[in-house]
Amino acid sequence: MKEARFYKPSAEGVQCQLCPHHCLIREGGRGICRSRECRDGKLYALSYGIPCALAVDPVEKKPLNQFMPGSFCLSLSCTGCNLSCRWCQNSSISQVTPEQADSTPLPPDEVVGLCLNQGLPSIAFTYTEPFTWWEYMYDIAVLAHDNGLKNIIVSAGYVEEEPLRELLPFIDAANIDIKAMDDSFYRRYCGASLKPVLRNILTMRDAGVHMEITNLLVTGLNDSEEQVGRLCRWMAENGLQHVPLHFSRFFPRYRWTESEPTPKNTLLRAKEIAHASGMIDVYLGNI
């Protein structure tokens, strides 16, 4: 447990300012992410230094197809997420408290030491939402850069500008998951909003971070030609034609088990639309 950054006192406790939710957290309470708690008028990051998942992955699994291709990364995660996607594939660690998941103490210097000892060139903050364990990610990222390692974020991109900008000098690559080009979709199915995500993608791009975008096509919800076209047009209009775009196949998960997996023809059509919109590199995932 470590005192969190990015909060201020409120009348009944604290107000977290890490992400756009700006949770008002009473004494003894926690924010939407379940991993930041108010104690004695201070906000604490409960999952600091206790990852619940640790693995060695091909970098293409993030997915990052054009960043150090063929290499492996140390993938690391703590519990917590500030979204509540109904089909979350990692709900057993993203939608629980730190106490509800198996974890192992691993301070930042030992994370970096693992990479160096195993000859791994990069660390990926992944599986859940790394911005909800910002302090742990930041401390690891700084040490990693000091030791010549690369840092990767796999995220939904739902974070405020100040914590994002403070972290960016230590981030080399990111895959950001755009849920849909529809704010009502975000609010209804993910418990978030679209505008901050788009803003943060452009901020990362402008900071020189290698960017790739993922769009999970959920059957009957965001897989229409109109939705795919809106995403591709936004990317093209904002100079992101050369950013690799991954359309990923949906499979029933968590609280969304009635829909069928995304038809392969839907993904193939999405790829056609993307190319017609000017996108250069388009990949299909989970097929």
Image (spheres, rainbow, N blue to C red):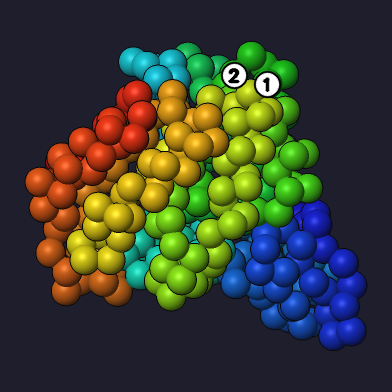
Q: Is residue 171 left or right of residue 37?
A: left
User: At 72% from the left edge and 58% from the top edge, which residue is drawn?
Assistant: 18
Type of amino acid at the residue the image marks with label 1: His
In front here: 239 or 125?
239
- Disc 2, disc 1: CB below 8 Å? yes
Q: Quadrant of residue 143?
A: top right
Residue 99 is situated, as x and y percent measured from the top left of the image, at 54, 68
Residue 157 is situated, as x and y percent measured from the top left of the image, at 56, 49
User: At 50% from the left edge and 51% from the top edge, which residue is drawn?
Assistant: 156
Residue 215 is situated, as x and y percent measured from the top left of the image, at 35, 47
Q: Which numbered circle lies on residue 149?
A: 2
Q: Is residue 28 above or below residue 241?
A: below
Residue under label 1, please give it: 145
SS at mark 2? loop
Q: Residues within 10 Å of mark 2 (few under 14, many from 20)?
A: many
Q: Residues within 10 Å of mark 1 (few under 14, many from 20)?
A: some
Q: The N terminus appears in which quarter of the rendering? A: bottom right
Q: The C terminus appears in which quarter of the rendering? A: top left
Asked if one can make out residue 80 in the rendered structure from this viewpoint, the answer is: no
In front here: 73 or 237?
237
Q: Quadrant of residue 170?
A: top right
Residue 29 is situated, as x and y percent measured from the top left of the image, at 70, 80
Q: Is residue 155 left or right of residue 259?
A: right
Type of amino acid at the residue the image marks with label 2: Leu
Q: Is residue 256 above or below residue 45?
A: below
